[in-house]
Image (cartoon, rainbow, N blue to C red):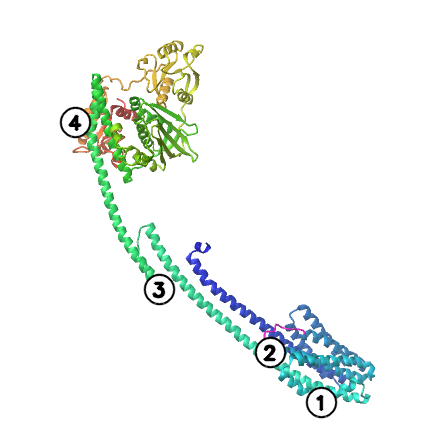
Amino acid sequence: MLLTRMSIKSRLLILCLLPTIVIVLLSANQVHQIQERLESYQVISEKNASINLLMEYSHHSYAALSKQLSGQDGQTSIALAQSSLDLLLAKQNKMLSNKAEREVSSSYVVELHQLITELNQASPQQTVELGRLIYDILYDLYSSILFTEGAHFNSRVHQLDIILSDLSWLHFWMEREAWLVKEVETEGWPYADFAPEYFRISERQQYYLDKFISLGADTQQFQGLLQSFTSPDFQQGAFVKEQLLYNRFSQQEVQQAVLIVEKRNQLLEKQLITYSRQLQQELIDEIETNQYIMWGIASAGLVLFFLLFAWGASTLYRINSKLTRILTVMSNMRDSGHVDQIPIDGNDEFTRFAHELNDTISRQKAYQTKLVEAKEHAEAANHAKSVFLANMSHEIRTPLNGIIGMTEILSDSQLNGSQKEILNDIDASSHALLVLINDILDLSKIESGNLVLSPHTANLREIIFDTMNMVNAQALKQEVTLEVEFADDVPVYAEMDEFRVKQILMNLLSNAIKFSANGSVLVRHSVDTQHRLNIEVLDTGVGIAADKLNDIFKPFTQEDGTITRRFGGTGLGLAICRQLVELMRGELVVESRVGEGSRFTVILPLVKPQRSPVPVCYDLKVLFISNQATHQQLAYKECVRLCSSVTQSENCQQVTDLSDDFDLVVYCLARHSKSRQDLAKLRAQFTSADIIGLQHHLYIEPDLEGLLVAQVTLPILGKRLENVLSQCQNDSRFRIARQVPPPMPDTGDVKRVLIVEDNLMNQKIASFFLSKVGIEFAIASNGLEALNLVKSGQEYCAVLMDCMMPIMDGLTATKEIRNWERENQKAPVPIIALTASVLPEEIQSCFDAGMDAYLPKPYKSKQLFDIFEKLSVTF
């Protein structure tokens, strides 16, 4: 509804303004009506005054005409008549609002003025004519004025207005009768000449008299007129009128009739003046009364308006200010957590509401204090747990480094098959323990909110290839076929945390291989309709029951109790995977059927990097022989993507006619093909080309090293294939590089590696890794010894620095070494942190101290040599 969408402030404002506006409008309407009534009364008043002036003019003009006929001086009467006309003209301008009516009426007045002026020079005959014209125009002027009416709001005023109009007409026709008698006297008209006019005048007199009696007059007014009519003069006038009407008079009696009619008219004029004054007084009283009413209504309206406005404004201010205070306090509680009491004043509902709300705030504040304390205790306990786990990890990793390191050292010795199998079991158990420690630490970081993602530009294909390479040994042991499919619409590079995505895929692939012995595992990626990256891991394993699909993502939970006994594991992998995916704002979806297999889909936001690396393309002319191998299509697409020219052939029989102008021959090994014979033919035919083999990860032929310059395992391509192609392009004749560098010749100027380690076992492992490849080293048992060795002037190509040591720890020693190098303008020696700590802040402190790389314990020799290569360490 509309009202529910309006704010309380808006409702209150409307509630205050609406009645106030209504009152103002009603008051204004009443005032307007009264003003209209006053204007109407003013019109009637002006009309009354105009009638009086017309009577005066009629009286003075009749006197002037009579005097002019009798030869007397009529200047005074003419002047008085002109004065009446001047006053009448002014009254008409006020009385008549219609311009056309005002102009017509004014023209009548002007004509009467001219006619009365001409009377001075008129002869008796002309005087008679002028008199007739004056009364004709006077009739029109009477009509113009008496037909003017205002809006009648008062019945008494309306009644007096009608009476005055009727008597004015009656007076006019009596005046007209007197002038007719005067004309008869002057002209000596016989009865036949004036009788029709006299009868018409008499009829008009009778009409207005009857109208006065039947419509307008009340008893008092009728009595007043009756007294005039019963007077002797009026009765004698009526007798004369009757004599004239019925031709019962002589010419000598006409002059006397004139005097009698004049006296009769004077009586009616007096009565008319009386009614006019009565009407004028009534109008004055009505005007005063309505003015008082108007001012009363206006004053009452204004007072009521200001009262309502003040009352509404104060109420609105009260409600608005209280609501604002309450909302401000609640907003502060929400935004900043700052809790204030609401100020209390007054004694209304808001006061009681504020009291209740303050009580709630007080309870909320106490609860919040307890909650903060509980949170601090929980954080302290969580931190203690994290520290405990980190310390336990450090303490476990230190001996574990000895186990893994000694296992690698022992693997290089002369062992029989049974001994090697036992050694492999020890190495697998050590790595399983390491994985468990890492999973527990990751779960702890996620639960405490301390795990931070580090997104950067990553190669999606390489992430999948690297992860498959890490589980290749497990797949070989389980005889699980690995497959990979790449969608063409997926970009090669994307912004993501490469390490965590690899960790997720590693867990999913490990589980898929673990539960799919003698089966297959497929990894493929695609882009869905919402432009999200989908990475699917499909297996043909034992499958998961539908009612257990949600349980497998709970920590330390597996489908049933027999899983651990049959397949191993702790139940942490999938829990970590789901939480990592959710941390990346993605989803981890599983579909499975018992006995058919499972499909895990990692759905992540696909964020394209602002800048992508330039695609690699090697200037090599390649002959690709597929042999209908299992992964031939994937291998061919990779060769086409990486090489400038690729010619494909299904087998060696189809290449006999090809010229020897290829830089490289890529041969896919297949179980059904005669690989040694094919490679011998290819070597004989393409003498200037290097030959590399692509072999299935489950079917490796180790006795082909003499025929191939390199072997790449299918379907694990990517950087492994790129490295081979790069070296083929750079070397005219490629030789496979050994995993470990050859022993360095002993010269007096050989740089050594400084091992800074307080643990004897760790000293042995590091020194063995270096010595087996002929790298010289020196050992320091703490940071102070290492600092003294560096300051002594001995040059080292690298420093392996443990962090936690007695006397002087590795961080302090690193800072002192960097300070000494700056002071003596020495080139900084690469310092590699060797520590069992896995806390992010401790790892960061290594780099803050000036170290160049970080190698967590336990580690293997290959990891150490990879860091040497990354830092460009030369021996």
Q: Which of the two labelled residues, at mark 3 and mark 4, occupies the earlier sequence position?
A: 3
Q: Please report the bounds of the magenta region as a residue range.
A: 147-155
Cα separation, mark 1 vs mark 2, equals 31 Å
Query: Quick one: label 3 or label 2, which is nearer the N terminus?
Result: 2
Disc 4: which residue: 760
Instruction: Please state which amino acid type lies under the numbered disc 4.
Output: Leu
Q: Which residue is mark 1?
A: 233
Element carrying mark 4? helix
Residue type beneath disc 3: Asp
Disc 1 secondary structure class = helix
Which residue position is annotated with label 3? 348
Res 174 quadrant in image: bottom right
The answer to which of marks 1 and 2 sits earlier in the sequence is 2
> Number of callouts in the render?
4
Return the residue nearer the eye: 859 or 385. 385
Q: Which residue is mark 2?
A: 156
